Image: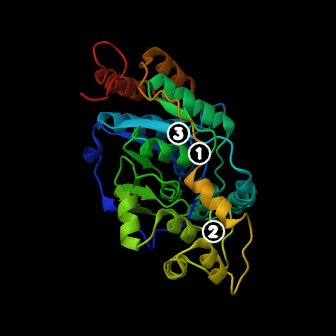
Amino acid sequence: MGVPLASIIKGTPVALEDMKGKRIAIDAFNTIYQFITVIRDRMTGLPLMDSKGRVTSHLSGLLYRTSRFLEAGIKPVYVFDGKPPAWKHATIAERSEVRREAHALWQQRVAEGAAPEEILKAAKVSARLTDEMIEQSKQLLTLMGVPWVQAPSEGEAQAAWMCHAGLAWATASQDWDSLLFGSPKLVRNLTISGKRRVPTKEAAYEVVPELLELKTVLKELGLTHEQLIAVALLMGTDYNPGIHGIGPKTALKIVKEQKTLDRIIAKAVEKNPWTGPEPQELVDFYLNPPHEGKLKLEPGPLKAKELRAFMLDFEFGAERIDKVIATLSELQPKEGGLGKWTK
């Protein structure tokens, strides 16, 4: 998802300990999608489910990862996507078709008795985040006492505004759009383990959380914020298909040579046409996206009994859930609630 900027932008390693006491605005959809993609049976490709057939991968990942963040002294606040802009509808439709085809391939691979890695590969691509999963995730966070924010539009945009406004120290997402929306700091690979599985493969690779600061990125690339957005537009974003044949390095070269948006687009379309919304409209959206300004970001009370009942209803093991609740309870200040989430 998002814009492929990894080849021209590099971050610096950051440890969980370095983020102790800091509020992190976490891209909820991006995070939950990781869970439903990766937490699957290695042989059948099926997600974690209870006996009623309800998917529980998102609840498992969200509970244990968030608890670990709290133990590390991090103050998470999850930001959920709202209504997508009209420009994104084509991308959403394309992704839905990819998932539909992947689901059919998954079933075909199972019927054929294919190798587990082939089954799992197709199953992961077919992963779909439903409204029910989103509501269950919000309910879980509320019971844990962890704040969450409903964005009016894009979650990355809301998180970026919170960071820019000083309400959060950084945005956490795998999506580079966070920088395009102006987040002063972006943390990628924010996880509790040293490994991450490749969504379309059986393999895992070492990951280290990395911090990117927008001002540093712009300085190293020799760009303004608007010019960084122009680089992304030439390659393609969630809102436009980009210009065929232009990758990160070519886009960067054109933008640095041409400087202004009009000249950048004029140069870029010499070989292939521009399609999609007007470039200036997209730049303006990235610079001034819809956001909610009235927010309650302090943690709520841990509802231990309700949390336990909620997780047991989804058939999670009582012993493990009780350990998590005991840990969360230890983090509470004497007056109740999770307070600043520090011991």
User: Which is more N-terminal, label 3 or label 1?
Assistant: 1
Residue sitting at the far top: 335
Disc 2 residue type (three-letter): Gly
The colour scheme used to paint the residues is rainbow
Disc 1 residue type (three-letter): Pro
115 lies above or below 331: below
Comparing marks 1 and 3, which lies closer to the viewer? 3
User: Which is more N-terminal, label 1 or label 2?
Assistant: 1
Q: Mark 2 points at which residue?
A: 236
Of residue 252 and residue 62, the one placed in the foreground of this image is: 252
Disc 3 residue type (three-letter): Val
Element class at badge 2: loop
The answer to whether one can see residue 229 in this image is yes
- Which residue is located at x 34 percent, y 34 percent? 70
Measured in 3D between alpha carbons, the distance from the residue under mark 3 to the one under mark 2, in whole angstroms, is 24 Å
Measured in 3D between alpha carbons, the distance from the residue under mark 2 to the one under mark 1, in whole angstroms, is 31 Å
**236 on left or right of 256:** right
The quadrant where residue 263 appears: bottom right
Q: Name the residue under label 1.
A: 47
Callout 2: few (<14), some (14-19), or many (20+) C-alpha neighbours within 10 Å? many
Please state, as top left, top right, bottom left or bottom right, where the N terminus lies in the image.
bottom right
Callout 3: few (<14), some (14-19), or many (20+) C-alpha neighbours within 10 Å? many
Please state, as top left, top right, bottom left or bottom right, where the C terminus lies in the image.
top left
Q: Mark 3 points at which residue?
A: 79
Element class at badge 3: strand
